[in-house]
Image (cartoon, rainbow, N blue to C red):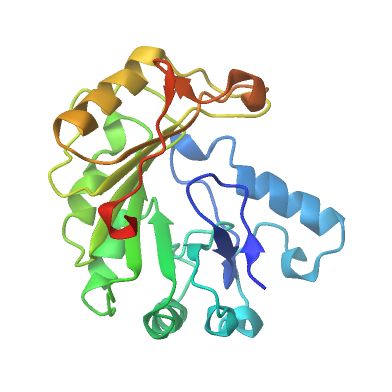
Amino acid sequence: MALKSHIEWTGSSWNPITGCSKISTGCVNCYAEKMAKRLQAMGNPRYKNGFNVMFHPDVLDEPLKWKKPQIIFVCSMSDIFHDSVSDEHITKVFEVMNKAERHIFQVLTKRSERLTKLSLKLTWSDNIWMGVTVESQKHTYRIDDLAKVPSKIKFLSIEPLLSDIPNLPLESIDWVIVGGESGAGARAVKQEWVRNIRDKCVSQAIPFFFKQWGGFNKKAAGKMLDGRVWDEMPIALQ
């Protein structure tokens, strides 16, 4: 069976690669790093090296065995375009996604430069959605990189949202996810930052998904924005 995800905008997770390293301000309170260390302490063999990058060939073919169509977040415990992941291993992951046509695969990276360099060497079947994380105005260059990728669906994960993003290019984007940071040490998100992004999405008819306000107690903070829940998905699912 697939591993059910607690991430609101996906269904399941698949981790043929685990481990990562910090690359920008959005990584400061990385949930995956904390989870990896917890699993290492519990003796989980996949995290025997903590949050160091590892390839797990024994789970590579798992999606081919899942008969029920699912939305799958790829490498939720890593970044598939990390420098420590070989081109060969990335290609193998893509080959499985190409074969498993009944599933939708959501791939997310902060390493958009490498994504762009490798994109023409990879096969982008329509079931592969490609996204980049954009936590502040400083990182909107990743959107320009994503625009060069031949994926059918391109999306943004603006989480954690750490600043206002007044200049957010959305011309090539099919879906936008926004969320405040959660957990101990969470940095605050302002309502106007979220509203500004929401309004741009609405004006351009781009599906908008607001995940959470975050904070130390994210459940208490909830996800209501201006009296409603925003949980829109790309047209491909409608």
Q: Is residue 106 visible?
A: yes
Q: Residue furthest front?
A: 238
* Horizontal arrangement in the rendering, residue 41 relative to residue 11 (left or right): right
Residue 136 location, quadrant = top left
Q: How many marks?
A: 0
* Horizontal arrangement in the rendering, residue 62 relative to residue 207 (left or right): right
Residue 65 location, quadrant = bottom right
Split into 4 quadrants, where in the image is the C terminus?
bottom left
Residue 191 or residue 233, whichever sits in front: 233
Q: Position of residue 16 (x, y in %)?
A: 57, 73
Give the residue at x 24% y 65%.
151
Residue 151 or residue 24, whichever sits in front: 151
Q: Judge whether 199 appears above or below 42 on screen.
A: above
Split into 4 quadrants, where in the image is the N terminus?
bottom right
* Horizontal arrangement in the rendering, residue 35 relative to residue 86 (left or right): right
* Horizontal arrangement in the rendering, residue 79 relative to residue 31 (left or right): left
Residue 173 or residue 23, whichever sits in front: 173
Q: Position of residue 125 (x, y in %)?
A: 29, 76
Give the residue at x 19% y 67%.
150
Q: Position of residue 119 (x, y in %)?
A: 25, 71
Q: Position of residue 199 (x, y in %)?
A: 23, 24
Give the residue at x 18% y 48%.
144
Q: Judge whether 80 appears above or below 231 on screen.
A: below
Q: Is residue 81 visible?
A: no
Give the residue at x 14% y 35%.
204
Residue 13 location, quadrant = bottom right
